[in-house]
Image: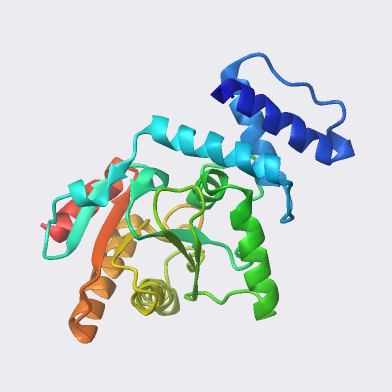
């Protein structure tokens, strides 16, 4: 199958799953097809799919990520000992683990084509991620608390694992409770990573997007939390601060020298 044929196959399968999609036609343009497919991925509830779908989906997503251009962690240069700054698409980074700014249900973003990192990670990992997270949370029996973290397989992403953490949502100026919760996100992920022999971890800018934590203050908390953890535990984990926006790159570059 070509990428176009895979995309049509996946769209047809997902449309056929739900009768409310009966009147939706498949667009002719590639960009519109991609938007529809991503929307269907985002809206799909956690459940199994047949082997043919999984096979085609995995081939499709791996090729889409390859076309984006995979960056290998080993090609990066540290800005400090075992600390890196990298601006790029975290779903195309090959390292041991990447951090997802998740919600308390850990089920990903259900808003079609939303711009949050949770949406991107769940989209390109594949439908297996939402199902794995659902099963994990069902076993836990309650939603994840702010500052907590969970680890899952990365499925179709080039990394090995995803560490999902729930950051604080800020209303107005951050409180001391918000600051401590954000620092706890970084510590929880690092502890979980070390526990699972994750040797390199890429942090996104937790809570700075939809959760409205001010960028510069969040970055200061992130850097301090990571550096203190490494000193206190003597952890050898390699930490990548991953940014997507220029404003965050400049902030971290200033903090890390």
> Residue 15, percent across and down?
79, 34
> Residue 227, percent across and down?
21, 73
Q: Is residue 164 visible?
A: yes
**Dividing the image into 4 quarters, which one contains the C terminus?**
bottom left
Looking at the image, residue 3 sits to the left or right of residue 208; the answer is right
**Dividing the image into 4 quarters, which one contains the N terminus?**
top right
Looking at the image, residue 25 sits to the left or right of residue 239; the answer is right
Which residue is situated farthest in the top direction here? 28
Q: Quadrant of residue 69?
A: top left
Which residue is situated farthest in the bottom direction here? 232
Q: Quadrant of residue 46?
A: bottom right
Q: Is residue 108 visible?
A: no
Looking at the image, residue 208 sits to the left or right of residue 61; the answer is left
Q: Which residue occupies 71% across, 45% down?
A: 43
Q: Quadrant of residue 23?
A: top right
How many numbered marks are there? 0
The colour style of the image is rainbow
- Residue 142 to residue 102: above or below: below
Q: Which residue occupies 76% across, 35% down?
A: 13
Q: Nearer the viewer, residue 81 or 179?
A: 81
Q: Nearer the viewer, residue 24 or 92?
A: 92
- Residue 154 to residue 119: above or below: below
Q: Which residue occupies 47% across, 75% down?
A: 147
> Residue 48, percent across and down?
73, 54
Q: Which residue occupies 52% across, 74% down?
A: 146
- Residue 54 to residue 208: above or below: above
């Amino acid at each position: 199958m070509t990428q176009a044929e895979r995309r049509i196959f996946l769209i047809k399968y997902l449309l056929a799953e739900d009768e409310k999609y009966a009147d939706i036609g498949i667009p002719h343009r590639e960009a519109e097809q991609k938007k529809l497919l991503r929307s269907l991925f985002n809206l799909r509830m956690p459940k199994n799919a047949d082997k043919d779908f999984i096979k085609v989906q995995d081939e499709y997503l791996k090729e889409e990520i390859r076309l984006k251009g995979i960056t290998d962690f080993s090609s990066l240069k540290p800005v400090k000992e075992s600390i890196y700054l990298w601006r790029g698409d975290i779903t195309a980074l090959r390292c041991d683990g990447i951090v997802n700014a998740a919600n308390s249900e850990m089920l990903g973003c259900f808003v079609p084509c939303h711009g949050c990192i949770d949406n991107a990670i769940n989209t390109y990992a594949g439908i297996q991620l939402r199902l794995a997270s659902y099963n994990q949370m069902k076993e836990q029996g309650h939603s994840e608390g702010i500052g907590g973290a969970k680890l899952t397989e990365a499925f179709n992403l080039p990394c090995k694992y995803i560490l999902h953490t729930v950051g604080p949502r800020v209303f107005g100026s951050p409180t001391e409770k918000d600051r401590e919760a954000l620092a706890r996100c970084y510590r929880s992920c690092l502890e979980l990573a070390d526990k699972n022999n994750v040797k390199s971890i890429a942090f996104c800018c937790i809570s700075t997007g939809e959760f409205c934590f001010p960028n510069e203050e969040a970055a200061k908390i992130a850097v301090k939390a990571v550096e203190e953890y490494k000193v206190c535990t003597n952890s050898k984990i390699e930490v990548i601060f991953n940014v997507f926006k220029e404003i965050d790159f400049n902030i971290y570059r200033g903090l890390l020298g």
